[in-house]
Amino acid sequence: MKAVEIFRIRRSFGPNSSEKIRGEAEDLINEKHYKGYRLISVSFTVEGSYFYAFITMKKPNTY
């Protein structure tokens, strides 16, 4: 069993797209936190015509 899980969110450019991806990332982090995951890191990047959010979280009950 892997102890770390990486989530990726992709959003195309548009009006307020940076705020939308930030909100989606925040919602995902909160949802996973309530399930016992612990946040390791969050990074945002732009590639081509897309915003990406990479969220790394430690699974519950792993060392």
Image (cartoon, rainbow, N blue to C red):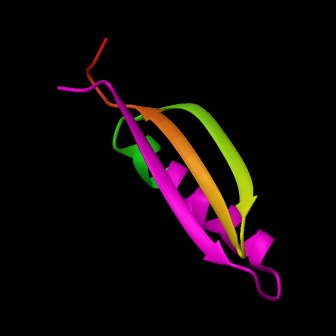
Q: Tell me the quarter of the picture where residue 18 sits.
A: bottom right
Q: Residue at x 44, y 42 (%)?
A: 6
Q: Residue at x 28, y 18 (%)?
A: 62
Tell which residue pokes out farthest to the top in this image. Answer: 63
Q: Is residue 48 or residue 52 the one in the foreground?
A: 48
25 vs 18, left or right, is left
29 vs 6, left or right, is right
Q: Judge whether residue 26 can be spotted in this image.
A: no
Q: Judge whether residue 16 can be spotted in this image.
A: yes
Tell which residue pokes out farthest to the left in this image. Answer: 1
Q: Residue at x 60, y 58 (%)?
A: 25
Q: Which residues are magenta?
A: 1-29
On the image, the x and y values in percent for residue 5 come to 37, 37
46 vs 3, left or right, is right
Tell which residue pokes out farthest to the bottom in this image. Answer: 15
Give the vertical position of 22 relative to 14 (above or below): above
Tell which residue pokes out farthest to the right in this image. Answer: 15
Q: Tell me the quarter of the picture where residue 23 sits.
A: bottom right
Give the vertical position of 48 relative to 60 (above or below): below
On the image, the x and y values in percent for residue 15 come to 82, 88
Is residue 62 shown in magenta? no
Q: Is residue 52 or residue 39 the one in the foreground?
A: 52
Q: Is residue 31 or residue 55 the one in the foreground?
A: 55
Is residue 13 shown in magenta? yes
Q: Is residue 14 or residue 31 the one in the foreground?
A: 14
Q: Tell me the quarter of the picture where residue 33 sits.
A: top left
Quarter of the image with the C terminus is top left
Give the vertical position of 51 relative to 7 (above or below): below
